Amino acid sequence: MKTPPSSSTTGTTAARIGTGLLFAGSGLTKITDPHALAEAITRYDLVSPALAQIGGHFLPWSEIVIGGALLLNVWRSGAWLSACGFSALFMVAVASAWGRGLDISCGCFATARTIDAASLLFNAALLAVTTWGLRTELRRATLRD
């Protein structure tokens, strides 16, 4: 007789799928216009325009790979670590822009959404979920070995 999944397993699966959809969807919305994304990155005033150009090409593909790995349930430790790292990067960038009073679009989902307290809360929640997912995955991997 099969036992039903625990709420912890169900929560982890929901977090993995939700985060995977978020990352893959975000990457897909930005992949067609890397130059617009590079401009959005430049407006944060954190990196040079040359580095922003690299980010404009690199970021969407990275998000798609991370999201795809989470959705397909492969390379879980690496996917959660990458999602957590990117979430921390997004959190720092948004907090920095908001703290400096920059009136810019976040560039998050190829929309003109400006950075505000809601953006900061969203990124804090994303960082919390990805940190929890990484912690859960590392604990599972440790128990498995």
Image (cartoon, rainbow, N blue to C red):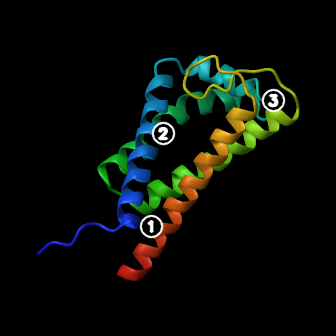
Q: Earlier in the sequence, mark 3 or mark 2?
A: 3
**Left or right of 59: which side holds 4?**
left
Label 3–label 2 contact, CB within 8 A: no
For mark 1, give the secondary structure.
helix
Amino acid type assigned to the residue bearing label 1 in the image: Glu
The residue depicted at 61 percent of the width and 32 percent of the height is 54
For the residues labelled 3 and 2, the Cα–Cα distance comes to 22 Å
The residue depicted at 61 percent of the width and 47 percent of the height is 125
The residue depicted at 78 percent of the width and 40 percent of the height is 95
> Looking at the rendering, in which quadrant would you find the C terminus?
bottom left
Amino acid type assigned to the residue bearing label 3 in the image: Asp
* Circle 2 residue: 63
Q: Does residue 37 lie above or below 142 as drawn?
A: above
Amino acid type assigned to the residue bearing label 2 in the image: Glu
**Left or right of 65: which side holds 83?**
right
* Circle 3 residue: 45
Quadrant of residue 42 in the image? top right
Numbered tag placed on residue 57 in the rendering: none
Q: Does residue 39 lie above or below 87 as drawn?
A: above
For mark 2, give the secondary structure.
helix
Q: Does residue 87 lie above or below 12 as drawn?
A: above
**What x and y, as percent, mark residue 64?**
42, 37
For mark 3, give the secondary structure.
loop
Q: Earlier in the sequence, mark 3 or mark 1?
A: 3
Q: Residues within 10 Å of mark 3 (few under 14, many from 20)?
A: some
